[in-house]
Each structure stands twice: as C-alpha cells, then as structure tokens.
Image (tube, grey):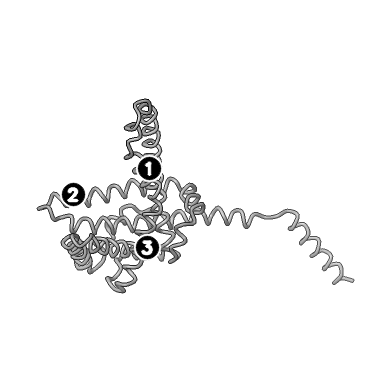
Amino acid sequence: MDIGKSFTFVFEDDQWIVKILIAAAILLLGVLFSWMLLIPLILATALLGGYSVEIIRKVVRGELDSLPEWENWGDLLIDGLKVVVIGIVYALPLIILSVCLGVPIGAFSEDAAGASSFLSLCLSCFALLYAIALSLVYPAAIAFFAAEGDMGAAFRFGEVFGFVRDAIGTYLVTFVMSWVAQFIGNLGSLVCGIGWLVTWPYAIMVTGHLYGQAYVEAKGESLVEEETVVFEPDEDEALEVAEAEVEEEVEDED
C-alpha cells in the first residue's frame, strides 16, 4: 500500500478545493438543519458516504490521483444509504450488547448483584473484541460493495472475514491509518470551531482511498494464491498427455 498517496491524492486533483468545499457545504447544511428529526444530517452523511464509495471504485480501477466529480447525486445518495445499512448490520451485535449492558440486572435482586457484575464484565470484554474485529472487517465489507456494485456482496460474511484473515497485515495498517485520518478530521475543531467542516470531508476522502488500496492489495494476494493452486502441474495428467503424444507419433510413422 502507498500510504502517502492516500493522504496526498486529494491535492493532486486540479479542482480539489472546489470539491472539498462542496463536501463542506453538504456537511454544514446537514448540521444546520439537523433539528428536523436528524433527516438532513443523515442525508448529508449518506452523500459523503456515497462519495467515499466512488473514491474506492476509482482506486479499484487504478485511478489513484484524482477525486470523483460531484455528479449523479441520486446515485451518491443511494450508495451512501447502502453504506449506512451495511454499517448498522455489522454493528448490530454491538448495539445489542450495549442494550444488554444498560439493563440493571442486579437491581432486581441483591443476590444477583455479583452475577450481574460478572456478566457485565464478560459482555464488555466481548464488545471490545468485537469492536476491534469490526474495525478490521468493515473496510473490506464496504470495498466489496463498492467494487461489485452489489450491497449483497458486503453480507457474504464468510468470504469477507476470510478475505481480511488472509490479508490481516494489510487491514491492520488500514485500521491504524484510518484512525490517523480521523484524528486529522478532529483537529479541524481547533480552528475557530468550524475547521472540521473541511478536515472531516478530507478525512472521509483519505479513508475511502485507504479502503480501496487495502482491497486491491488483498485481492492481489488472494489471486496469487489461487493461481498457485489452479496452475499447479498434475503429474498423472501430464504423463497421460505425453503417452498420447507418443502413440500419435507411432501411428503417423506407420
């Protein structure tokens, strides 16, 4: 993976300032009108998510040096909403665990207090482990959807988990660098309190590029392994072919 490229490719686009400002305007409108049952904020998040999906697709196609155009807004919105659904499905175990941890089991019985504390500890540990696993798997799930254009691809859980397992080093790097991007996004809050309107879209663009690169690199590793298995010579088959060639030569001579 070219980590530096993910953090600099934004500035290699001739229209990068305009494209980031468009993203900032979308985010600002979503926040300003979030009092309307949060729907504008959800729509703004979906548009930015759809834009990130387009970045992943460009990387998968080998287009590493430019940002997508802000066009086909309906498609961006639909893709972004699909990203939201994928995120909710993958986070569902965490949501359920959070609800369980919020239920005061021991409040109904003093005798159950000890058991409740132990159960809460076990659930908390499991939630932590799942959160870490989710941070590794989620980028692959989104990349599967982006690359194949089918939301169902993100829910081929066995394939997605196996994909990450076989390229765990790549996804560990992606995990760390995604946190770096989020840190940069949060730094914008220190600039007059509104700098995040620019740094958060930038962080989203960087993250999309990282997800795309991780998918391409992991896919390349998988293809090498498959080719090794598929094209491994079969001694029995090779012997049969050689015998057939000898028989043909004998027949020709006769």
Q: Earlier in the sequence, mark 1 or mark 3?
A: 3
The span from disc 2 to disc 3 (Cα, nearest Å) is 28 Å
What's the residue type where badge 2 is placed?
Leu
Q: Judge from the rendering whether residue 226 lies leftward or rightward of residue 205; answer left or right.
A: right
Residues at marks 1 and 3 touching, judged by CB atoms closer than 8 Å:
no
Q: Which residue is mark 3?
A: 82
Q: Judge from the rendering whether residue 175 lies leftward or rightward of residue 26; answer left or right.
A: right
Query: Could you tell me which quadrant the C terminus lies in?
Result: bottom right
Which residue of the protein is positioned furthest toward the left in this rendering? Answer: 192
Residue for point 36% across, 36% down: 124
Q: Judge from the rendering whether residue 176 lies leftward or rightward of residue 25; answer left or right.
A: right
What's the residue type where badge 3 is placed?
Lys
Residue for point 46% across, 57% down: 155
Q: Residues within 10 Å of mark 3 (few under 14, many from 20)?
A: some
Q: Which residue is mark 1?
A: 97
Q: Which residue is mark 2?
A: 187
Residue 176 in the image: x percent, y percent? 33, 45
Residue 249 in the image: x percent, y percent? 82, 68
Residues at marks 2 and 1 touching, judged by CB atoms closer than 8 Å:
no
Residue 166 in the image: x percent, y percent? 49, 48
